[in-house]
Amino acid sequence: MPRTHKQLIIAICAMIILSSVFLFLPATSMQVPEPPYYQKYYSKPATDQLIRAELGHSTWTFLHTLAAKYPANPTAEQKAEMKSFVEMFGRLYPCEECGQHFREMLGKEPPKVESGVEFQKWLCGLHNKVNLRLGKAEFDCERLNERWDCGCKV
Ligand SMILES: Cc1cc2nc3c(=O)[nH]c(=O)nc-3n(C[C@H](O)[C@H](O)[C@H](O)COP(=O)(O)OP(=O)(O)OC[C@H]3O[C@@H](n4cnc5c(N)ncnc54)[C@H](O)[C@@H]3O)c2cc1C
C-alpha cells in the first residue's frame, strides 16, 4: 500500500476514535452521583456534638425571640418575608442532619405566619418535634410567654 494511503487510513481512524470519545463523554459525566447536600455550601458535614448543641441552643434563642417579635397582625410583605426566611434557614442551617430533618418537617407542616401567636405556636411545635427526636422533654407551648419575649419591653 502506498505510504500516503496508509497515512490517510491512520488519520481517519484517529478522527473516529476522537469523535466517539467526545460523543460519549457527556453521557458518562451525567452518571456521576449527586454530591451530598452539605457540599453545596460547606466542604465538611457538622459532626461535632458539642458544637451542634451550642449552635442549636443559640439558634433556638434566636428563632423564639424572632417569633416573639413577629407582629400580631403582620402585613402581606411580612408574612412573605418570614416564610422565605424559614425556607432559606432550613437550606442553610450549618448542621446538615438538623437542616435535613427541619426541611422534612417543613414539608409536612409549612410555617404558619398569619399572626404572631400562630407563628410562635408553630415554632414551639416544631421545636418539640426536635426535642422528641432527641429524647428531650416536651415544652408546654401554652407557657411560651414565660420563657421568651421580644426583649423590647420598656
Ligand atoms: C432547627 C434545628 C434542628 C435541630 N436538629 C437537631 C438534630 O437533628 N440533631 C441534634 O443532635 N441536634 C439538633 N438540633 C439542636 C438541638 O435542638 C438542641 O438545640 C441541642 O441539643 C441543645 O439542647 P438544649 O438542651 O440546650 O435545649 P434547646 O433544645 O436548644 O432549647 C433551648 C431552650 O429553649 C426552651 N425550649 C425547649 N423546647 C422548646 C419549645 N418547644 N418551644 C419553645 N422553647 C423551648 C428551653 O428553655 C431550652 O432551654 C437542632 C437545632 C435546631 C435549631
Image: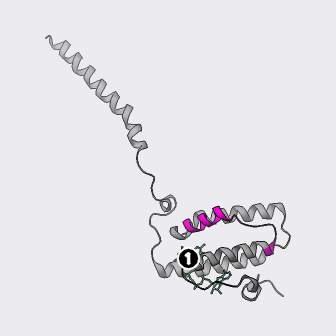
- Give the residue furthest to the top: 2
Span of residues in magenta: 100-117
Is the residue 49 above or below the residue 34 in the image?
below
Residue 30 location, quadrant:
top left
What residue sits 75% from the left and 89% below the top? Answer: 146
What residue sits 40% from the left and 48% below the top? Answer: 32
Q: Is the residue indicated by label 1 positioned so its CB lies within 8 Å of ligand 1?
A: yes
Q: How many marks?
A: 1
The verdict on residue 113 being magenta is yes
Q: What is the chief secondary structure element of the magenta stretch? A: helix
SS state under label 1: helix
| Left-right relation of 64 to 41 | right
Pick the residue in front: 70 or 114: 114
| Left-right relation of 56 to 12 | right
Residue 128 location, quadrant:
bottom right
Mark 1 highlights which residue?
133
Is the residue 153 above or below the residue 119 in the image?
below
- Residue flagged by tag 1: what amino acid is it? Arg
Residue 18: x and y in percent read 31, 29
What residue sits 84% from the left and 64% below the top? Answer: 75
| Left-right relation of 72 to 59 | right
Residue 28: x and y in percent read 38, 40
